[in-house]
Image (tube, helix red, strand yellow):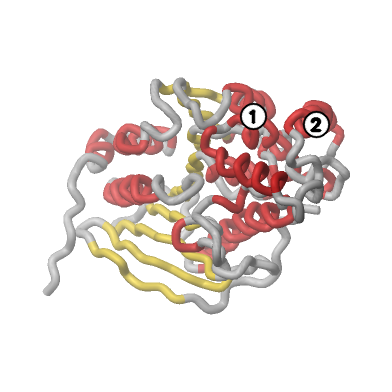
Amino acid sequence: MVSFDYRGKVTEFTQGYIMKSKRFRGLYTRFHTLYPNPEKGTETVEYYLFDPKEEPVGILFILHGLGTSNIPFLLWMATHLANANVRVVMPILPGNFTRVAHGSVSGKDFFDADVEKATKFWEQSVVDVLSIVDHVKSQNLWVENSHLFGFCLGGMVSVMLNAVRDDFKKTILMTVGGEMATLMWHSPTLAYFRRSIEKLQSNEKTKGRIKHFIDDQKRIKEIFKEQLQTLKEFKSVEEMQTSEIHPYLKLDPIAYAQFVDKKKIIFVEALFDKALPLRSRKLLWEALGRPKRYIIPSGHVTWLPFGFIVGRFILQNMGIREFKKQMELLKKIEVEEKK
């Protein structure tokens, strides 16, 4: 069973400035997760807030991708969007960057031979982001012009968020795919998953003990092909999560797509994306009801150094079309001098 339920609210948190520029303040906030069963090392929720000094023109949540290397690029984009007067919140998802589970590696735990273990990281990601939304609202920092930007893993989580809550006016899915069976067995990014399967199969102690056909490429693909056709039968997210479909399908954004308002989705696909097989991208786009789609001439991550272009695209979709605001993306951040 998968569940995004959580109780309580954030009552204690620590927060401090990490930077002060002439146009915005950068803050770092930490609090204990509301997820009931976190892995050791992921118990503390962390998020960055870049808050303009003037009245913000909107609020943007940025959800990063799998691992660590993409995060500095997205933080750069966040600071420059704040320079253009957007309030930006960037959570660190559990299992990544500074929130890696003890003994693990950044990004690894979302795809694991032990699906029960992987489930915890997907569940906690949704719970942590929703609790950050609640926390931002409790501090009277929410803005009606609210948008969500999700890259790769962050985009997959963004689909789940849109299926269970209606907090954001628009969501930009940046190079995102679904269909876990295809991803696990064909994505170059998940080669570590396939190596772990081979290692378990060659070990006499673990051989034959892998559950749910995770180690059987042909069988798991057959299961997904069959069960993807049954998703329309579910009338709610909860009904799907408590059903008998494959546990990895319950973690697949495709299973949540029918519960998402396609008018709120903007789908950005990279033409030369090798990390996400074409089938993965196409199936998710179709499951979302074929929302507005842009195809850019880049690879899965090669757009990251060109954050200005993506930042401008975000501003335009937030309804911020002033040339002066867009040019703030190009300007060097002016750090406030200490007095």
Look at label 2 and name its amino acid: Arg
Q: Is residue 169 visible?
A: no
Q: Position of residue 33 (x, y in %)?
A: 59, 69
Residue on which the image places disc 2? 219
Q: Label 2: state its secondary structure.
A: helix
Camera-side residue of 131 and 250 = 250
- Image-based side of 58 in relation to 226, left or right: left
- Image-based side of 15 in relation to 334, left or right: right
Q: Position of residue 166 (x, y in %)?
A: 63, 47
Q: Is residue 10 visible?
A: yes
Residue 248 lies in what quarter of the image? top right
Cα gap from disc 1 to disc 2, whole angstroms:
21 Å
Residue on which the image places disc 1? 284
How many C-alpha atoms fall within 10 Å of the one at disc 1: few (<14), some, or many (≥20)? many
- Image-based side of 69 in relation to 165, left or right: left
How many C-alpha atoms fall within 10 Å of the one at disc 2: few (<14), some, or many (≥20)? some
The quarter of the rendered structure image containing the C terminus is bottom left
User: What residue appears at the point 69 percent right and 57 percent down from the top-left corner?
Assistant: 117
Mark closer to the chain start, 1 or 2? 2
Q: Position of residue 197 (x, y in %)?
A: 67, 44
User: What residue appears at the point 69 percent right and 40 percent down from the top-left corner?
Assistant: 252
Look at label 1 and name its amino acid: Leu
User: What residue appears at the point 41 percent right and 73 percent down from the top-left corner?
Assistant: 15
Q: Which mark is residue 189?
A: none
Q: Is residue 284 above or below residue 213?
A: above
Q: Label 1: state its secondary structure.
A: helix
Q: Is residue 139 above or below residue 159?
A: below
- Image-based side of 119 in relation to 143, left or right: right
